[in-house]
Image: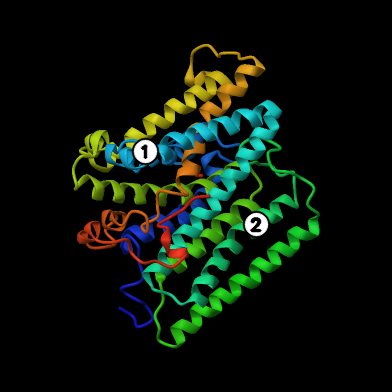
Amino acid sequence: MPRFLAPSQSWLFGPRVDLAVFAGSALVSVAMVLAAPWLGAVGDTPLWAWLLLVVCVDVAHVWSTLFRTYLDPNELRQRPGLYLGAPLVAWVVGVLAHHVSPGAFWTLFAYVALFHFVRQQYGWVALYTRKARASDVERRLDAAAIYAATVGPVVWWHANLPRAFWWFVEGDFLPGLPAWMGTLALALHAVVLVAWVAFQSLRVSRGEGLQVGKVLLVGATWVTWFGGIVLARDDFTFTVMNVVLHGVPYFALLFRYSRGRGEEGGYGAAGTVLRAGLPGFLLFLVALAFTEELLWDRFIWHDRPGFFGGADVGLSPDLLALVVPLLALPQATHYVLDAFIWKPGRQPALLARLGWAPRSVQEGPPIATSRDSTMVIRGGSE
């Protein structure tokens, strides 16, 4: 292996998986955008792309959190307050927001989702930093780079509203940011990323090695967020760039965790699903995602009757205030729980189940971690 690589620190899941879920996700996203004219996907997202990207990736990855939480009897017994309280609080807050106005609900939901998406990318880079036992300087620079790659384009987006796409519904982000702030945000994001690249180059020149996976992650994050927000001109481009890099690595994380947890036994319904391997894991999640979207269409959106079939259901405003937050509950719960369930400092067996620590760690004391390395991956989605 070339000297500039750092073999023991370069990968999280392994070279093939890391390349597939991080670099591969970005490359597939770019390829789909470039091929959009031939795919008939210029402008609005066509039905096939919506099924593939939104249902099978975005919504399905939300449901994959079940394998870390509600499908595990032992986990439920350990933290019943969290698993009962998170959806209850999320639903009550959603109902209150929707009673203020539907717009208030979707604006709140959009910003929570945005925070989750940004924090998930930070969670990945924190994992790489933890594995490399990086210095405080490198840790802070890595964090600055991932926040620059995500927040910079988002600030520019807010300064250039309206766009031809939106997060959940039209007008969910708050307008009013002056255009010059968007330009400044992109300038600052470029400065931070150039400094980060210079630091990585310095590491190589000093013979300290390069965390290839981390470099690919930051690069993929920048490509998809800058390309999917600043360069995007339609909903299809935004959807592709927004969804694939967020959902596919999360599938890898949950499947890896589930296999490790399943080896311990007592995994309940999750263990039954996993007997079918990765296909069973994914098909189970897609079935749940499809059911959720069917309910959204029948009760709320009414925009795909030819696909979902059946008669639409009309609801009064008071009922909508109860039903919309209920249908949004899988996503809202996913956002909340991701802030708690990926911290090995609170559950030392977590790293062992992911294959990142010896099995004996399950019997030992909590792993000593720095402030940023106490998370495996943390959303603020998704």
Residue at numbered disc 1:
66
Instruction: Please state the horizontal and vertical placement of residue 50, each as a whole percent of the image.
Output: 51, 35
Q: Three-letter amino acid code at disc 1? A: Leu
Residue at the spot x=70%, y=62% of the render? 185
Helix, strand, or loop for circle 2?
Answer: helix
Q: Is residue 87 among the parts visible in the rendering?
A: yes
Q: Is residue 237 among the parts visible in the rendering?
A: no
Q: Left or right: 131 with respect to 143?
A: left
Residue at the spot x=38%, y=34% of the render? 286
Q: Please state, as top left, top right, bottom left or bottom right, where the N terminus lies in the image.
A: bottom left
Q: Left or right: 99 with respect to 343?
A: right
Residue at numbered disc 2:
153
Helix, strand, or loop for circle 1?
Answer: helix
Instruction: Please state the horizontal and vertical placement of residue 140, each as a whole percent of the image.
Output: 54, 71
Instruction: Please state the horizontal and vertical placement of residue 222, each as a whole percent of the image.
Output: 56, 61
Question: 10 Å neighbourhood of mark 2: few (<14), some, or many (≥20)?
Answer: many
Residue at the spot x=44%, y=53% of the render? 25
Which of the two residues, 29 or 330, is positioned nearer the viewer here? 330
The image quadrant that residue 153 belongs to is bottom right
The answer to whether residue 175 is above or below residue 365 is above
Q: Left or right: 216 with respect to 37?
A: left
* Label whose residue precedes the other's in the sequence (1 or 2): 1
Instruction: State the colouring used for the structure image.
Output: rainbow
**Closer to the camera: disc 1 or disc 2?**
1
Instruction: Please state the horizontal and vertical placement of residue 238, each as a whole percent of the image.
Output: 59, 46
Q: Three-letter amino acid code at disc 2? A: Pro
The image quadrant that residue 128 belongs to is bottom left
